Image (cartoon, rainbow, N blue to C red):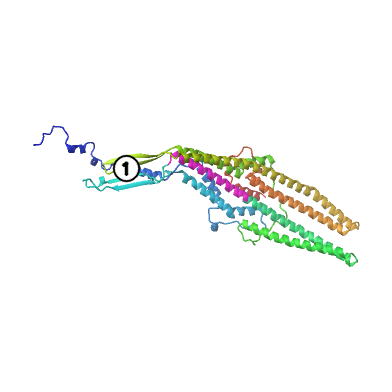
Amino acid sequence: MPAARTAGAPRAGDFLQLGPRPARYPFRSPLLVTAYALALAGLAGCALTPSGTKPEQARLAEAGKPYEPKIEARELPELTDSPTWQDVLHRAFLANGDLEVAYFDWKAAVQRIEMASAYPNSNVSIGYSYMFSSERMKSFDRQSFSAGFDSSVNLSFPTKVIKKGEIALDDARATGERFRSAKFDLQRRVLVAWADYTLLAERLRIEREQIALTRMSADAVRARTLAGGAQRDLLKTDVSLRKAEDSIKSMEAELSASRAMLNGMLAREPNAALEPPLILPSPRPMPVSDDVVLAAAVDQNPELAALAHQVQGRTDALELARMQWIPDISPTAMFTGGISQAVGAAFMLPTNIVEIRGGIREAEAMLRGSEAMLRQTKRDRAASLVATLVTLRNSERQAELFGTSIIPLTERLLTNTRQAYASGSAMYGDLLEAQRTLLDAKLVVAQARAMRDKQLADLEALMGTDIETLSTAQHSAPATAESAAATTEPMVTSHQESRHDR
């Protein structure tokens, strides 16, 4: 006979019923874990981008307006029959492929900011399993659901992700400065090529005048030879005439080659018409002192700005290497039907001490190297700037001397010689020699002005700004690296404004 059951004593089967019954709230655990999984999935579209990302994106969008449409959809400005250097430069900015490559490198670097700042940096992992058992269990209780992060990729601590975004931003800013440097380098190459092209055309005009004088001299010598003069004088004059004609042919070939190179920079057919100026253009004004030029070069040089951002990036990389001592944490959640629920976290301890210390030392070495490069580049650019300024001022001095002193004196000499020849007190050869002297002086002026224009283009590339901009703006406060990086468009706009002003 079974033992009497004491009132209030639990039965053996009652131990399974202690606590809340799972069937009473069958969907509490699934909803919690589902909400957790949805929260993890929602985080997948987040990015811990640094504060300077939007201004950099705005600068990129402004600078990229000419390059975003495909080349087939762009409307490149057609050059007139007699284009100015402003027209040539404007088309070069819109058509040059090397500059377009530099822009898209910058765009790719900006896109990498959000990629580096994406959080969480690990994919969400959703798990499911079904338990087979002979026990009498509900089908729902046999199913297990889990949500967490990919175990093959550690979920980084948020400060590490933020630092990676800052490193990517530094790289994007440096790439933006390299785009600005490429723009000024293109400007320098185009203006130097245009100055050489213009000078070559002027030399060709002067050489044609010289050969006309040589023909006149040959006619005079021929007349004297027929009157009984020495035959050797006629032979010497014929040799000079043949050499002058050969020089003309060589200059014409050189002019055609220079035209082909310019057309290549402008995305035109090599043999497309490109007439040089009929007269030597007026020199570009430079109404600023050398001190202003030096200050602008220190503040806005794109190469120095790029190196400064590179140094900042290496500094951030060193901080990131030190952050590797911070452990990573990957949370998880799971439930098995209505039977059990669990939350947990996996801690990834930084046990690879040798690798972490090696990464820190590597980052320190790269930072020191970047700092040394920045210091040396500053010295090199300062030396190049001073040398360019000296050469430019000397070209101005030479052009001023010949233009205001030597050429007027040579013109007076030609007038006096012409009058003396008319009165019979001077030889015909003296008159031709005076004309040659005047042409030689004009050629020196043309060469000095072309050299000055080329040195000015080099100076603008070193300064990272246009001389027209300096002439109209007060250069009182030093510009920051960010303000310098924002000046990617004035190279087109300022020259276009100056073209319309003239």
Q: Residue 166 in magenta?
A: yes
Pick the residue in front: 103 or 161: 161
Q: Main secondary structure of the magenta part?
A: helix
Judge whether residue 362 can be spotted in this image.
Answer: yes
Q: Residues within 10 Å of mark 1 (few under 14, many from 20)?
A: many
Pick the residue in front: 325 or 440: 325
Quick one: SS at disc 1? strand
Quadrant assignment, res 21 = top left
Q: Tell me the kind of residue under disc 1.
A: Met
Q: Position of residue 238 (x, y in %)?
A: 82, 64
Pick the residue in front: 99 or 236: 236
Q: Is residue 271 left or right of residue 45?
A: right
Q: Residue at x 64, y 49 (%)?
A: 495
Q: Position of residue 34 (x, y in %)?
A: 33, 44
As drawn, the residue found furthest toward the front would be: 354
The segment highlighted magenta reads 156-185
As drawn, the residue found furthest toward the top would be: 7
Q: Is residue 123 left or right of residue 501?
A: left
As drawn, the residue found furthest toward the bottom would be: 226
Of the 4 image quadrants, the one containing the N terminus is top left
Q: Position of residue 157 (x, y in %)?
A: 43, 39
Judge whether residue 54 can be spotted in this image.
Answer: no
Q: Residue at x 76, y 62 (%)?
A: 246
Question: Mark 1 = which residue?
Answer: 334
Q: Residue at x 25, y 45 (%)?
A: 141
Q: Residue at x 73, y 62 (%)?
A: 249
Q: Is residue 273 left or right of residue 224?
A: left
